[in-house]
Amino acid sequence: MHMTWHNLIFDPARQIGVGEYTFRYKFQTHGLVMVRIEHGLITKWREYEVESNLPWDQFTAENKF
């Protein structure tokens, strides 16, 4: 298994974090996760991912940040 984080964002005022990632195991996925922190712990977690063999730069080629 291997995971690479691409863009990580944290809003300290709202205690919300977002990260884009690539995860490789039996196959490869690219995804996005959002978390809410309360009292130093993750209390909410939302995640979306899609299977793709493309490298991250090609996967995001038309919508780079």
Image (tube, grey):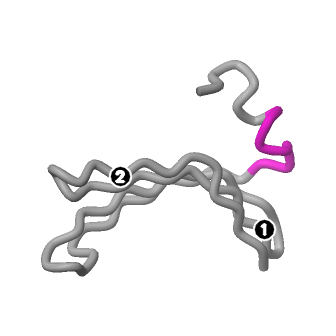
Residue under the image location 63 percent in, 22 percent down: 63
**Quadrant in the picture for residue 12:** bottom left
How far apart marks 1 and 2 lie (CA) works out to 24 Å
Describe residue 45's horizontal placement relative to residue 28 as left or right: left
Q: Earlier in the sequence, mark 1 or mark 2?
A: 2
Which residue was labeled with disc 1? 24
Q: Is residue 56 magenta?
A: yes
Label 1 environment density (alpha carbons within 10 Å; few <14, some 14–19, many ≥20): some
Q: Is residue 3 above or below residue 52?
A: below
User: Which image quadrant: the N terminus?
Assistant: bottom right
In-front residue for pair 44/10: 10
SS class, disc 1? strand
Q: Position of residue 27 (x, y in %)?
A: 81, 66
Describe residue 30's horizontal placement relative to residue 52 as left or right: left
Residue bounds of the magenta highlight:
52-58
Describe residue 40's horizontal placement relative to residue 6 as left or right: left
For this orientation, the residue located farthest to the front is 12
Q: Is residue 48 above or below residue 27?
A: above
Which residue was labeled with disc 2? 10
Residue under the image location 16 percent in, 50 percent down: 13
Q: Is residue 33 above or below residue 3?
A: above
Q: Is residue 8 above or below residue 41?
A: above
Nearer the camera: disc 1 or disc 2: 2
Q: Is residue 6 magenta?
A: no
Identify residue type, mark 1. Answer: Arg
